[in-house]
Image (cartoon, rainbow, N blue to C red):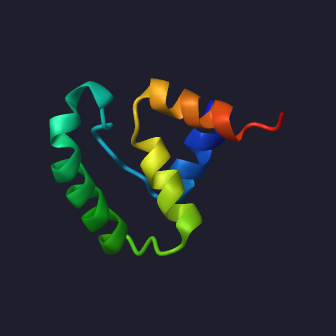
Amino acid sequence: MARTQHVLATMMGLRHSKEFVTSNLKEWESYASRLMLYLEINNFSSSTEKCVVLFSSCESSVFKLVESLIAPA
């Protein structure tokens, strides 16, 4: 799954240099504002595209949690 995520992110031109780290929740508003600008500048308009960008920008533990929650039973 991680390889697929990397390939998809690369195909979409995703170039996030920093991931959001949950231990620094005070920075969420600033991070979210920068993420919204990134989405707008790069013309990501569909929910799917936005989710890919967001989840690709989260630390590994968040990605693993989301992955486990959406995995088929």
The residue depicted at 48 percent of the width and 44 percent of the height is: 55
Percent from the top left, x then y, of residue 25?
22, 35
From the viewer's perspective, is 48 left or right of 58?
A: right
From the viewer's perspective, is 72 left or right of 44?
A: right
Quarter of the image with the N terminus in it: top right
Between 58 and 3, the one nearer to me in the picture:
58
From the viewer's perspective, is 68 left or right of 9?
A: right
Q: Residue furthest right?
A: 73
Location of residue 40 (image quadrant): bottom left
Percent from the top left, x then y, of residue 60?
46, 26
From the viewer's perspective, is residue 49 above or below residue 30?
Answer: below
How many badges with numbers are in the image?
Answer: 0
From the viewer's perspective, is residue 47 above or below residue 17?
Answer: below
Percent from the top left, x then y, of residue 33?
21, 59
The residue depicted at 81 percent of the width and 38 percent of the height is: 72
From the viewer's perspective, is residue 24 above or below residue 33?
Answer: above
Quarter of the image with the C terminus in it: top right
The residue depicted at 31 percent of the width and 37 percent of the height is: 20
Between 9 and 71, the one nearer to me in the picture:
71
From the viewer's perspective, is 72 left or right of 67?
A: right
The residue depicted at 29 percent of the width and 41 percent of the height is: 17
